[in-house]
Structures are given as structure tokens and as C-alpha cells.
Amino acid sequence: MSISAPKGLASSGQKPITEILHPLSAAEEPLSPGPDVTVSGGRDKEVGLTNGTPVETPSPASASVLFNRLHLDDDLDPDTRDPYADTETHDLFVTVDDPKKHVSTMETYITYRVSTKTSRIEFDLPEYSVRRRYQDFDWLRTKLEDSQPTHLIPPLPEKFVMKGVVDRFSEEFVETRMKALDKFLKRVADHPVLSFNPHLNAFLSAKDLNKRQGLALLTKVGESVKSVAGGYKLRVRPPEFCALGEYLDTFNQKLGTIDRIAQRILKEQSEYLTELREYGTVYASWAGSEEELQRPLEGVAGCVTTCCGALEDMSENMSQDFLPVLREYILYIESMKNVLRKRDQSQAEYEGRLEAAVLRKQEDRTPIPAEVEKCQDKMECFNADLKADWERWQSNKRQDFKQLLTGMADKNVTYYEKCQAAWESLITVLQDKQTEDKTSETN
């Protein structure tokens, strides 16, 4: 059996409320397979993800040939491109930079400068510059999640870090968090719905955020929905959303495995780097006591030093650029699953109210109340918003992973080129030394 998540969720019309209680007809078409995920049946077969058209040719001999064979976003035909790729707003630009450490008697924290340029009439000024700390970003995301429950809210980097393992005030950690916060805010500002949220306006423009200003009404509505749908079991999730959930599970499994292996590789590289530096130091000290071998030994020490620098650059790229993207998408998956659960809850509420209304109609012939139709409208709104955000997420994912994999390949090529050039230069030194020795013996 093969289950695939297409680039776009299939758009299916909603059944009339009088038919929703009947099981799916056998004549209905299943979700058509697509290129993004393939789930193979069988106990011993591994679930696989694909992105683009597989190439049934031997492995390329060079990096340039490899990139020419990648079937990513740039290779898509115009008719198959993501229809939501060009829906980003272009009148709101935000940037997060300039982290600063603040020390007080009560606490120590980091703030970031949030700069905004816009031509929207909702803003009083064309430019703003405010300082925000992490908990302000967390406040914004919570408000977006409460006020826009049908939309996918981009994730924030994790708030808590393990003490003694990561110094949250270190330059490396602050830089990585700043990039993640900048990406979060840019994704929100580019969204055609979230970017018009009044809480985002306040976050970008207000000098002091009024965090006590909540959405009590929406909270109460959310609690009432839970109480109505809490005792009702969802009958059948539409096939398109089943495929979405299966894709998220598979994608999460793959990313989790890559993340764990990458963490181990990074740790092993760090240990190897420590040994390599000690290795080079030994050659450098040895050269001081061997006059005839001084140049070759110093050459070896220089090669090892060059390799250390190249490995350090590659490891830094993995820790600051590669791993954060993986972690962001793992968190993104959790956000998407959360929206999917809310969608299911909305469907359960609708089905529960409809079933109760049908029973009442059978007993006393009363018409189906308007609140049932409102629940149906709400569910359809949920479906439409989730599909649109799914398309946007897929488009962003293709772009992000194209950049991620290309950068990783470039860094590896650069690392091996530096190491190769260093050792090739040592061969020249050794050959010159051999020529000098032969000349001295002849004389």
C-alpha cells in the first residue's frame, strides 16, 4: 500500500449535513498519491520520504553533477509550482537583531531589537524600533494561537536549556536564538492572515506591551467547544487529513533520526578536533629538536593546524545552521499536529450537535437548529485555512531544505578542499627536502 502527501491537499466539497452521519461510499475516490511521502507496506520495509522525481542513475562523480540532478523547487514546471508561493505580503518588513544583555538585582536577560518598516494604514508610523525579550515573543505566539486557532502558527525556539550543558548567555547561543526569533517573526509578517493580527501590531509598535490584555471571550468559547466535543468520538477523519497526519508522523521520524545522528557526529567531531590539535602540537615541538627534519615536521604541524581550522568551520556550520533548521521543523510538526487536533475537535463538535439535532427531529419533528449550520461553517473554515497553511508550509520547507542541503554540501566540499590543498603543499616541501639532500650528498 502506498500513501502519499501531495503538494496540495485535495479540495473536496463538504457533504450536506443530512449525509454526514452515513459512512463513506465505496464509490468515493481515495486520496491520490503525490511525490512528498511514500509509506510502504510490510513489516520489514522502511518508511521513506521523497522530494521530487527519483533518478535511476549511478551516483554522480562530482558535487556540480549532483546539484544538477536535484529536483527541487527551481526545477518545478510552472503548472506544478506551489500556487501559494506568491501570496506573501510585501508591505511589512521586520528584522530581529542587536541582542543586548541586561543585568538587574532580580534577573539577567537578553533583549533583541525588532525593527519594522511598513506602508500599512493600520500602523501610525512607517518605521518602528522596539526592544523585546524572549517572553515577549512567547506572549505574541500565545495570542496568535488563541485568536487564530484555524491557522498554523510558526514555532519559537525552545525556551528552556539544560544548565551546565548550554550557557544561555553565550555569544553562540544568543546568536542562534536571535536567528530563530527573526525567522519566526518574518514567517508571521509574511502570512496573509496572521500579519494583520492586532497583537502583532502591538508587538511591533508599542513601547510597552500590555500583556494582561487577553482574549477572555475566545478562551471561554474554546472551553465550551471542548465541553461539547469532549464526550464525542470523531467518526471518520477525511482522507486528505489522514494523509496529512501520516506524512507528519513519517517526516517527524526521519527528522528525529537525522537530528540524533547529527548530534553524535558533532560530538565525535569535537572529540576528534581536540585530539587533532594535540597531534599537531607534538609535531611542532618535535621540529624544535630535529634540525634536519625541521621543515618537514613543521609542514606536518601546519597541515594539521589547517585541517583543525577547516573542521572547526564545518562543525560550527552544523551546530549553528544545520541543527537549528532540523529542530525548527520538528517543532513545526508539533504545531501542525496541534492545528490538526483542533480541526478534528471542530468536526467532532459539529457531528455531535448534528446527531443530537437529528435525534430530536425524529422525536418531535423540530427543524435542525441554525447552530448546527454554524458549526458546519466553522469546520469548513478550519479545513480551508489548514489546507492553505499546509501549502505554504510545504513551499517554505522545500526552500529551506534546498538551502540547508546545498549549504551542507558546500561546507563539506570546502573542508576537504582545504585539507587536500594543505597536504599537497606538504608533498612539495618533502620533495624539495629530498632534492636538497641529494644535492648535498653529491657535493
Image (cartoon, helix red, strand yellow):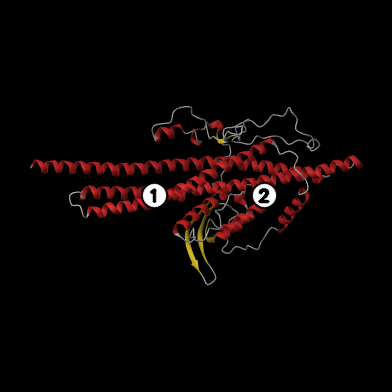
Q: Nearer the viewer, residue 223 or 275?
A: 275
Q: Locate the N terminus and report the quarter of the image it occupies.
A: top right
Amino acid tagged 2: Pro
Give the residue pinned by disc 1. Answer: 272
**Could you tell me which residue is drawn at 53 percent across and 32 percent down?**
78
The residue under label 2 is 149
Q: Which mark is nearer the camera, 1 or 2?
A: 1
Marks 2 and 1: in contact by CB < 8 Å?
Answer: no
**Within the image, what quadrant is residue 3 found in?**
top right
Of all residues, the one furthest to the right in this rendering is: 364
- Say which quadrant the C terminus sits in: top left
Measure the C-alpha gap from mark 1 to mark 2: 48 Å
Q: Within 10 angstroms of label 2, few (less than 14), some, or many (20 or more) residues?
A: some
- Residue 409 lies left or right of residue 140; in this view the side is left
Residue 116: numbered disc: none
As helix, strand or loop, the secondary structure at mark 2 comes to loop
The x, y position of residue 271, in whole percent, is 41, 51
Query: Which residue is painted at 45% across and 46% down in the image?
Result: 265
How packed mark 1 is, by other alpha carbons closer than 10 Å (few <14, some 14-19, many 20 or more), is some
Query: Is any part of residue 153 visible from this angle?
Result: yes
Nearest to the observer: residue 346 or residue 432:
432
Amino acid identity at mark 1: Tyr
SS category of the residue bearing label 1: helix
**Observer-nearest residue: 301 or 56?**
301
Left or right: 430 in relation to 58: left
- In this rendered view, identify the residue nearer to me: 277 or 229: 277
Count of numbered circles on the image: 2
